[in-house]
Image (spheres, coloured by chain):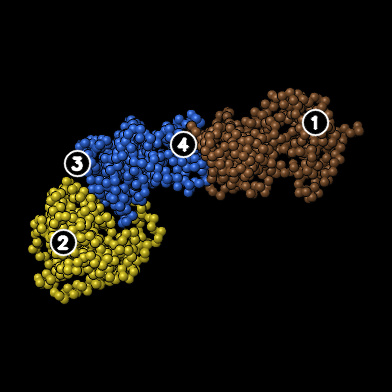
Chain colours: A brown, B blue, C yellow
Amino acid sequence: MSTNVIMPQMGESIAEGTITKWMKKVGERVDRDEPLFEISTDKVDAEIPSPAAGLLTQILVKENETVAVNTVVAVIDGEGSAVAVPAATEPKPETAHQGPIHAAPQAAAHIPPPAAPTASEQIETGEDDVRTSPLVRRIARENNVDLGQVKGTGLGGRVNKKDILDFIEQRGPGTPVAPSAPAPAIAPTPSPVSFTGASQAVPMTPMRKQIAEHMVASLRTSAHVYTVVEAEMTRVVAARDRFKEEFERRHGIKLTFTSFFVRACVEAIKESPIINSSVDGTNIIYRRDVNIGIAVALENGLIVPVIKRADEKNFLGVARAVQDLADRARTKRLSVDDVQGGTFTITNPGSFGGLFGLPIINQPQVAIMGVGAIEKRPVVRDDAIAIRHMVYLSVSYDHRVIDGATAEKFMGRVKKILENWDEAVL
Amino acid sequence: MPLLTYLEAIRQGLWEEMERDPSVFVIGEDIGVYGGAFKVTAGMLEEFGEDRVIDTPISESAIVGAAIGAALMGMRPVVEMQFMDFIACGFDQIVNMAAKLHYRWGPAVPMVIRGPSGAGVHGGPYHSQSNEMWFVHTPGLKVVAPASAYDAKGLIKSAIRDNNPVIFYEHKFLYRRIKEDVPDQDYVVPIGKAVVRRPGTDISVITYGAMVWTALEAASELEKEGLTLEVVDLRSLLPYDEETVLASTRKCSKVILLHEDTRTGGMGGELAAVIAEKAFEALDGPIVRVTAPDTPVPFAPPLEEYFLPNTQKVMEAARRLAAY
Amino acid sequence: MAGTGSSTKVVRTTKIDAALLGKMIYYLKLTREAESRIENVLYRQGKIVGGVYVGRGQEAIGVGAALTMRAGDVTFPCHRDFSVFLIRGFTLADMMANWLARGDSPTRGRENTLHIGNVDLGIFPIISPLGATLPVACGAAMVLKRRGKGNVALVHFGEGTTSLGHVHEAMNFAAVQKLPVIFICNNNQFAYSTPVEKQYAVESLAVRGPAYGMPGESVDGTDVLAVFGAVERGNARARAGKGPTFLECVTLRMTGHSAHDAAEYVPEKMKQTWAKKDPIQRLEKLILDKKILSRKQIEELEGKVREEVDAAIADAEARPLPPGKEAIEGVYCDTECWWSKKRL
């Protein structure tokens, strides 16, 4: 049984790595986890442990050569049992992710090592770098799946049928390409419940299981406290109404309420950095970057793409990021980078009509804001009843590190920014 | 339903056809007085007489040739090869005469050549071969290889009623090891139809003959590991049931082709080709063959054991393929 | 050189039947004319493709043997036994169509030369490994024996194939089973280029009969009456349930193995000697001597034969070649049998 040694992905956006040193020669024995070679990437230099024990039979990439991640760089012929458990011998590309981010509903475990590909990289590398089968390629084609997004659990990281079906199940069927062949052999099954009795047991999808675990773990981990404020949206609605056409014409992107909320939160967080922290044992980890996660509902779950360094972006920058993530979430092209590293999350029960929700914190973050439905309500202004666009904003915060006063101050700031919206939109 | 061995089921099928149709007769070496080397035709001489249970000289060419002549004259002869290994002596008659007659000038050639094949009984190189592919590669012949007693009876009847030369591969290892409820009334199993012996989803094991049982055993074992094998029993090798092969391939996406016959040019190669041609995009892993190696069948028990595919070998291949 | 009548008794027939002699001369001449057109005209015109094998000089064997046959008898003629097919019921036009690879022919273009058969006519053709028909003839004879109507199976083959295992097995099998089969060996002294000295080591193949437990006889294969008589004797035994007979008919192949073979390996003197024994001339002389037919009547017969052959060739040539896609049809005899469908 031979094991392929691959160039690991050491970091979110790493597409390639350079082998700087081989610590073993062909023909030498190597133990599992024994240092095998050193690499240098844009981000890190690292010593790579051998994925398996055995004889190093081939070195396919010489020192100082640069190859794409997942390239097979060496082959180790295993010893003992002929039956390999290849999944276990794979280097874990996640090891290099910064921080102990157990992204809850981010489906991280099912999103693969390959670098978040930019559009142009996508064309160059394409699917052909994915080790897979004719079947999987067909399923990918028919279901609009970028195989680079699917984590392979097969031999040498191959994407196999189970991998892609799990991926599709989590993602939802997406927009299937009309199959040219007669009925595809394997239907991506969003199993409809057909009752044979009073109740029917349907196994959870892996994504559902993951969400369940993370939600319960979060409740167990954080001391959830909730508060709700009401904000008048008159200025925001006015600004949006006034500029949305021009904005779209000028920038080619939609002017959404989400961008306003993100901007408001970012500004408020700058004044309450504890909101942008996490807890590590008895330490509070403050995060320099403000990375705002936006919860997006999927048919069978949800995903939380993250606007990275939202604090460095102006309104237009935020709007672009929102649009980009929304588009890629819709076309199932989110990369591992896109769903990791969030420091604060905004969720939007209002989009389904909820007045407000009390969300569960997305670990290891310490706060999450829920945006209710924006609607006209009668409010008292100057002792008269007026009609105004209003919204309830809730926040769930971790009382381990955030006290009520801090939370109220934060929410007060968000409310104030929205009610007195004066930032240039265009 | 009476419990019959594989061998008894063949005899019952033959017997019923002899009773049903006076044009059916059996011919071969030591089949009359002695009742056949394995006793498949025991009692037939007494029942049907010398005209219909014909003991011959050791002359496979003459036996097969005579059967062809009789078939051309409207009879339905059933030839017994004492061992399928000896069929080579009648090869010209089978492949050049019987197989091509209909294509050349149109006559029906309703005849069956049946006999014990296969290893596992320490028979050595000349009492153990699985040489079915010599005939699967011969258009005009039909080749069947039942694995169960039920199929053995149903297929011998289909073979006898067929208007073409049918080579009927019995597996001697199964003769007295398989016991099943077999209906004692008339029924047939159609030639060219496979059967799914055990449904599964992870890997399709396509096989025939004695290896069906090996596959079923491996499937039971692997189920404990959470791996479900689908076992397809081809039953007929020529024509083979392409539809079932492809359906099972499409269902499981991974395929093991298992046979006791040697590797190169075996049924597995043919099936692999048709799967690659017609179900390429259903494949989620390489098409894997588990077969005997390309050697004659050796005699000494350790050698024979090494030679033969077995449950362990199937399980190992299945685990490897599952991990792919 | 093959010996004639050395090992067992040779009984010359003395019975002269005018009608029978008339049939004999007609079929001999028809065969000679048809085969000569095939070899010297159609083949050279490129109308016949593939190999051309004829029975010049050996026509008496087929004619003599086939004319002994009764209803219910079956025959397994060889590729040099053109007359057998005619005598037992194929039309000349159908045979010519087969030579010309026509779709509407006994084999629908699947087979060449005289590899044509018909179950209803009781004619079963050779396959190219010639001796293989002998066991098959035994099987047919088994059925005839069981039917109990005194029918026989005649099987033709050459001396070359007697060296093949099939022949040994069949002769032994037939003798053991006492089958009504007549083994008719055309010993034309060359198997392709191999002379009899290199084929077998007995003086006459007739000894093969007794070796298996059946009579063996050797006759002059250019003497149609001798052949007829010998086959009749074998038939009589067989019809009486006494089993098979082996008959060697000694001739010389007066052509090459096939039309492309000049047969330079055959000594010139041998050719000259056997040319004098031409079976048609021999019978013609007898017929004239016995005044059964006049010279003029024979010339008329020759004219009629030429016309028949002309007509048959015209008929055959008018038929189309089979469409290529038919190559995949008719491999199996199943329901919807392709062979049972009428041709368009």
Residue type, mark 2 in image: Met
> Under tag 4, what secondary structure?
helix
**Residue under numbered circle 2:** C1
**Residue under numbered circle 1:** A273
For the residues bearing labels 1 and 3, Cβ distance under 8 angstroms: no
Are the residues under marks 1 and 4 on the same chain? no
Q: Nearer the viewer, residue C233 or A110?
A: A110
The answer to whether residue C168 is left or right of residue B122 is left
For the residues bearing labels 1 and 2, Cβ distance under 8 angstroms: no
Q: Distance from label 2 to label 4 (Cα)? A: 66 Å
Q: Nearer the viewer, residue A363 or A256?
A: A363
Crowdedness near tag 3: few (<14), some (14–19) or many (≥20) residues, C-alpha within 10 Å: some
Are the residues under marks 2 and 3 on the same chain? no
Q: Distance from label 1 to label 3 (Cα)? A: 105 Å
Give the label, 1 or 2, closer to the camera.
2
For the residues bearing labels 2 and 4, Cβ distance under 8 angstroms: no
Q: Residue C159, located in which quarter of the rendered image?
A: bottom left
Residue type, mark 4 in image: Ala
Residue A294, percent across and down? 73, 37
**Residue under numbered circle 3:** B50
Residue type, mark 3 in image: Glu
* Image position of A329 with respect to A212: above or below: below
